[in-house]
Structure formats: structure tokens, C-alpha cells
Amino acid sequence: MVEAAFSIEAEFPCALQDLWAFVSYVPNQDHWVFGMSDSEVVGGGAIGVGSEIVGVSTDSGKSLRVTMVVREYDPPSRIAWENTDGEVPFVTRITCSGDEISSRMKYDVTLYPKTRLWKVMMGPLRPLANIVANKRLRDEIVHLREALERSA
């Protein structure tokens, strides 16, 4: 099985609890995760292991309804969800640490491409895919910083 893992770490000038509250509140994905909209926990209520998250992912003008399942939930330090829809299933893991003054987040995304095109992108064309994926993660961190500032 071909897989591709991407990761970024970032510091934030806010308390760990503030960072956690923002990134673990599913509708906030719409404010910082590239192409996401209409994100919500199925059935509403609290999030936890086994919760389903739905949303719309738009990329290059193509929108796809996605369903993700929360696989890890350990407030205020770790949340992970898995998507098995579409051409490129993925696992996203967010790990937070910090104190009352500053916080740090590690953001990991692992892709498990199914189609030949995506397997080629994650195989022989991996250096190009790394550039694109790392830029996207950096952009998402910028959007997360801006969203945190707006919410403060």
C-alpha cells in the first residue's frame, strides 16, 4: 500500500486550552483547513472516539462530501480522525502541548491513495507532492493563526 505522510509543527501565542478549544471544535475546520466547509459532528453534541464528522471538501472547483470518524480523542492534547471516502483516504492527527501562555501544535496528515494517478503522485512524483503538501500545511497554519486571532 502506498502512503504519504506530511507533518508540520507550529508555535502559537495563546494558551493550550484556547488552541485546543479551537482545533477540536469541528465547525472551526471551515476557518483554517484548506477547502473545508459545512463541517459538523453528525447528530451534534460532544465529540469523542467514534464520532462521525461530515463536511464538504472543495479542491480545484470540485466539491466532495466527506465523512470522517474520530479515532483518537484525548483533550487537550490529541485528536485524530480518519476519512475513507474518495480517491485518497487520509488520517489527520493533531497533537497540542503548552501552558497558559503559549502552545504548540503538531499537525500530521497521512494519505492512502487508491487510484493509479494518486499512487503515481505519491510514488515517482513524490518530491513534487511533498512541495505541494507542505505548502498547503503551512498555509493552513497561517489560516489557523489568523482564525485564532479573530476569535480572541
Image (spheres, rainbow, N blue to C red):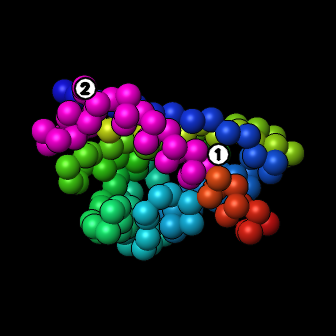
In the image, which is nearer the foreground, mark 2 or mark 1? 2
Which residue is at 70% across, 61% downward? 146
Which residue is at 37% across, 34% downward? 128
Bounds of the magenta segment:
112-141
**Residue carrying label 1:** 76
Q: Which mark is residue 12?
A: none
| Residue in the foreground of this view, choosing between 45 and 108 | 108
**Residue carrying label 2:** 124
Name, please, the residue furthest toward the left.
116
**Secondary structure category for the residue under label 2:** loop
**Secondary structure category for the residue under label 1:** loop
Res 41 seen here: no
Where is residue 99? Give x, y as percent: 81, 40
Which residue is at 49% across, 48% downward? 136
Query: Based on the displayed image, in which of its 4 quarters is residue 63 positioned?
Result: bottom left
| Type of amino acid under label 1 | Pro
Where is residue 37? Give x, y as percent: 43, 70
Using the numbered discs, state the Cα–Cα distance from disc 2 to disc 1 in whole angstroms: 38 Å
Res 38 seen here: yes
| Residue in the foreground of this view, choosing between 33 and 26 | 33
Prevailing secondary structure of the magenta residues:
helix
Label 1: how many Cα within 10 Å (few below 14, some 14–19, many 20+): some
On screen, residue 148 above or below 131: below
Where is residue 32? Give x, y as percent: 56, 60
Image quarter of the N terminus = top left
| Type of amino acid under label 2 | Pro
**Mark closer to the chain start, 2 or 1:** 1
Label 2: how many Cα within 10 Å (few below 14, some 14–19, many 20+): few
Residue 119 sits inside the magenta stretch: yes
| Residue in the foreground of this view, choosing between 17 and 124 | 124
Which residue is at 58% across, 45% downward? 138
Residue 137 sits inside the magenta stretch: yes
